[in-house]
Image (cartoon, rainbow, N blue to C red):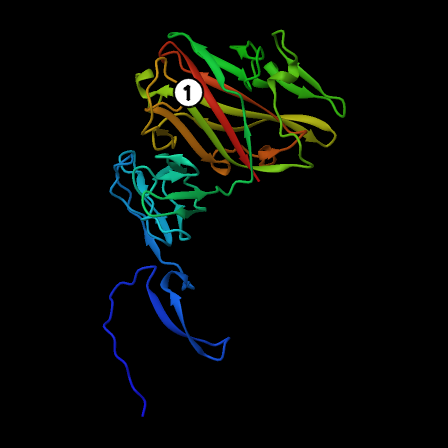
Amino acid sequence: MAIIYTYPRKAIPSDDDLILIADSSDNNKTKLLKVSSVGNTTQEVSNLVLEGTDDTTTARAIYGVNLIETATISDLATRLPIASTGKQTTFVNNSTMPILVFPSATGGEINGVVDGYASIPNDGKPYTFICVENPLPGAWVWSPPATGQIQLPTISVAHTYGVGTSAWGVGKPGAQLINPAGANWYDNLSVTGFPTLTFNVISGSAPGEDYWSSLTGVVGTRKLVTTKVYSNFLETDSPFPSAIRPTVGRFVAYEINNAFANYTASGVNVGTDPADGGVATPVGPLNSPVEVGDIGTVYNIQPANLVQVPPASTDDVGPNNYFTFNIGIHPLMATKTYKFDIFLEHT
């Protein structure tokens, strides 16, 4: 006669709890298995409600897929789930601005940075974090999906109140045009000729090629995915920051039908008005003078297809696809040396 055993039931198992199984690969022998080793075939999906702007946030992500549909200047932060080694959580940000993700607890790490944070762009793509250390405060690693990035040298633009400033270049020393006289942008800088190229510049002592940059070390072209502009611009630098803020334009030159053509390519406004899509940095130091990334400084991360000027080929990057930038500072903005760090993410 068979003996039936009954056991008390536990409502919520822990990772180290043991369960009995019949091992089908070993003649159904009875064996013990940790709860933590039992995988799920599906992940829970949850709409994550953000809260606050720093590591005091009360929002907490789940293990699974966290969908972000809404973020605001005052509510754009969350903490990672309670640390559990080997588990992972994914964020998909469909809101109108980047969000901030903080470690599970104070003292926790993200990619080796203690009490750091990750900025998740509002591009609707999945960003996955994996816990590599517990118990609390825990440690996490993540890898953004972009496959390549161009980082320009910091571009500094000296500006005096009362006079507009239009600066051209890509941050190379000595190669900056300020308020050039050309009626059209390509009267100031252009690339002509093929296959022998001429880099034309209206004035200045630097070689014309120094005002341009390109993606080297690849064969063929890649496609621009995201434009990121970080600055030391504060909203207090402007009397009307929703309308008077720095503008950053990208201009390109590349070969079409055995000749080089020059095009306006895209533009990003470094402002926090919803139409601009920028964000004031919520946490960080405040230096004197103010530096890029200080608290309150404005940055803007834009998917390329939202700010592009046709044709689509203006978003191609490669060894023979040259680009330059124009930074515009309004006459009513405060006297200051404005600084800009520009990143171009590409496939």
**129, above or below 115, in the image:** below
Question: Which quadrant of the structure image shows residue 140?
Answer: top left
Q: Look at the picture and state if 34 lies above or below 128.
A: below
Classed neighbour count for the residue bearing mark 1: other residues with Cα under 10 Å, few (<14), some (14–19), many (≥20): many
Residue visible at 51% across and 19% down?
326
Residue 138 pos. (x, y %): 35, 44
**In this orientation, which residue lies closer to the viewer: 316 or 184?**
316
Residue 245 visible somewhere in the drawing:
no
Image position, residue 84 (x, y; %): 36, 51
Task: Identify which residue is drawn at 61% across, 8% down.
Answer: 203
Q: Which residue is mark 1?
A: 246
Which image quarter is the N terminus in?
bottom left
Q: Residue at x 38, y 39 (%)?
A: 109
Query: How far across and down, in percent of the image, does residue 42 sit?
Result: 41, 62
- The quadrant of the picture occupied by the C terminus is top right
Q: Which quadrant would residue 137 be assigned to in this image?
A: top left
SS category of the residue bearing label 1: loop
Query: Foreground: 331 or 69?
Result: 69
Q: Could you say which quadrant of the image residue 175 lies in?
A: top right
**Who is closer to the viewer here, 116 or 193?**
116
Q: Amino acid at mark 1?
A: Pro
Position of residue 202 in the picture relative to residue 237 (left or right): right
- Residue 67: percent from left, percent from top: 36, 49
212 with respect to 343 (left or right): right
